[in-house]
Every structure is written in structure tokens, then in C-alpha cells.
Image (cartoon, helix red, strand yellow):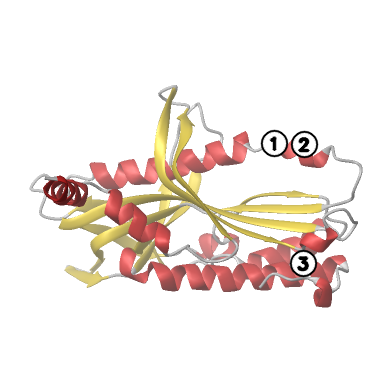
Amino acid sequence: MVEKIEEKIIKDILTTGFPLEMEVANNFSRDRWIIDHNSYYIDKDELKGREIDLVATLFLNNPEYVTKDGYFELHYIMPIEIKLANKKPWVFFNTEASNFERFMGIPLIKKEIGFRNEHYKYYDIIMENVTQLELRIGRSFYEAFSGTGSRDDIYKALTGTIKALEHLVEAFPYDDFQDNKEYSNRYLFIYEPIIVVKGSMFTANFNGEQINVQEADYIQVSFKYLSPNYDRQNYMVNVVRSDKLAEFISNKEEKMRKLYKELCDLEGISLEEVDIA
């Protein structure tokens, strides 16, 4: 009897989104990553709590210096929404990035505390190591084969990630770190919204009178959100196919470790005494 119930529970679980969430979370099951499941955030437009599937944080520090002047923490924080697109592939209409967009790069959402060097010095290093702008960017979107050109799931995923991102930025007690006068420590927080899609994604663009459609593993989506309750309006959201997530994470981790080491060098922290393995 117990075995039959267990089998039924397994079948029931497979009809929910939990297996996909755990599958995505397992990609972060390595040192230095911290995973928060079903994290809540405040939707300031609706004045209610909502859920984001995952918040993944890469945490790099030099623990032996925690009570010394050379201490440095880097937090790379990704609010992640997970979606299925098996029956209705996601399609993003893309265009080339403008000259202005290429000059500005991806909007960088960060907080920094305690750095000694001039802003431009470490800002240039950060910009060299964070996500770089693609040649083509998603501008609009819809769910294929929906019959009505529906875009609700994609729009909800985009708004959910950026609202969760804003909550994470606003809710963190940066002042507590800033007001700690006992040690001259350094902290850097970098935020990047992510949507993981299990299923098919495509890009589409117009070339004269012809429509070109191509399958995609990864798309940068320019998302503009205007609300009196949110100060920021322009976001770049990374949309990643689930089977390419491990590669995406590995690339981010490599970049953040490189960023950590270069900022340590800029700040005069001995690299030989920094363990971020």
C-alpha cells in the first residue's frame, strides 16, 4: 500500500514545476554558490508578496582577513524565474544593438562599499568582466502556436525577475556594512536577472520582406518597465535555455573570479593570500 502511494506521489510531483526547479538548482550545487528557493519579494505595484523561483548568489571572499583591513566580499546575485516552453516556443524579435547601446553597454546594477581607489578605476575593471552586450538584442516577444499571439508567460517572467531584483537591491542592509567603522572592509554586490526556459526558443527578424527565424540558446532581452513605484526603467534580462545553463553558470563564475582577483590587485590585497577556489 505504501509503495503504491509513493508511486502516485512521484507521478503527481512530475506534473508540477518542482522537478524543473530542482534540476535548475542542481546546476549551482558547487562551492561558493548559495541558493534560496521560492524567495519572496514585494511587488510594489500590487502591494503584495510574490515568489521568485530561485535566487542564486556566488559568494567570494578571503575569510582569513575577515577582521582585518584587507577583507573583501563579492556577491554576484541572480534572481531566476523558470518557465516551460515545450508546446509554445518562445520567440523574440531582435534587432542590432544601436551605437548608443554599444557605447553604454548592459545596464549595470550594483552596490559597492569601502573601495579606496577612484571610481573610474574599479568601474572599468567591473565593466570588463560583467556580461557584455550581444550584437543583436531581443526587443519584443510572443509565444508561438498560441493562436492569439499571446505573450503573457514571457511578460510575467520578465516583470517577475526585475521586480525581484529591485526588492533584493532595496532590502539588503547596506547601511549596516557602510556604518561598520571597526574595519575598513570592501563589499561589492552585482545583480543580474535571469530567466531559464525548458523548451525551445527562437529569434526572428525582418530582412527586407523576408522573416528570418533561428533557434537560440541564449538571448539578451531589452526590457523597459515604466511604473510610478519603480525608479529604474531599463533592464537587460538574460534568457537561457535550461540545457545550456551549466555552460552559462561556468562562464559567469570564471568572470567573477577574474573580477575578484583584479579588484584585489587594484586594492593592494595580496593574491597569494586570497583563497577563492
Mark 1 or mark 3, which is nearer to you?
A: 1
Labels 1 and 2 touching (C-beta < 8 A): yes
Residue lying furthest front? 1
Position of 22 with respect to 134 (left or right) is left
Callout 1: helix, strand or loop?
A: loop
The residue drawn where x is 72% and y is 39% is: 174
Which residue was labeled with disc 1?
173
Q: CA distance from mark 2 to mark 3?
A: 22 Å
Q: Identity of the amino acid at label 1? A: Pro
Q: Identity of the amino acid at label 2? A: Asp
167 lies above or below 207: above
Q: Identity of the amino acid at label 3? A: Leu
- Residue 232 seen in the current view: no
Q: Residue 95 at x, y = what percent?
A: 35, 64
Residue lying furthest top? 47
Dot 3: few (<14), some (14–19), or many (≥20) neighbours within 10 Å? Answer: many
Q: Residue 263 at x, y = what percent?
A: 77, 67
116 lies above or below 111: below
274 lies above or below 92: below
Position of 59 with respect to 116 (left or right) is left
Callout 3: helix, strand or loop?
A: helix
Labels 2 and 3 touching (C-beta < 8 A): no
Q: Earlier in the sequence, mark 1 or mark 3?
A: 1
Residue lying furthest left? 147
Which residue was labeled with disc 3?
263
The front one of 63 and 257 is 63
Q: Residue 153 at x, y = what percent?
A: 26, 44
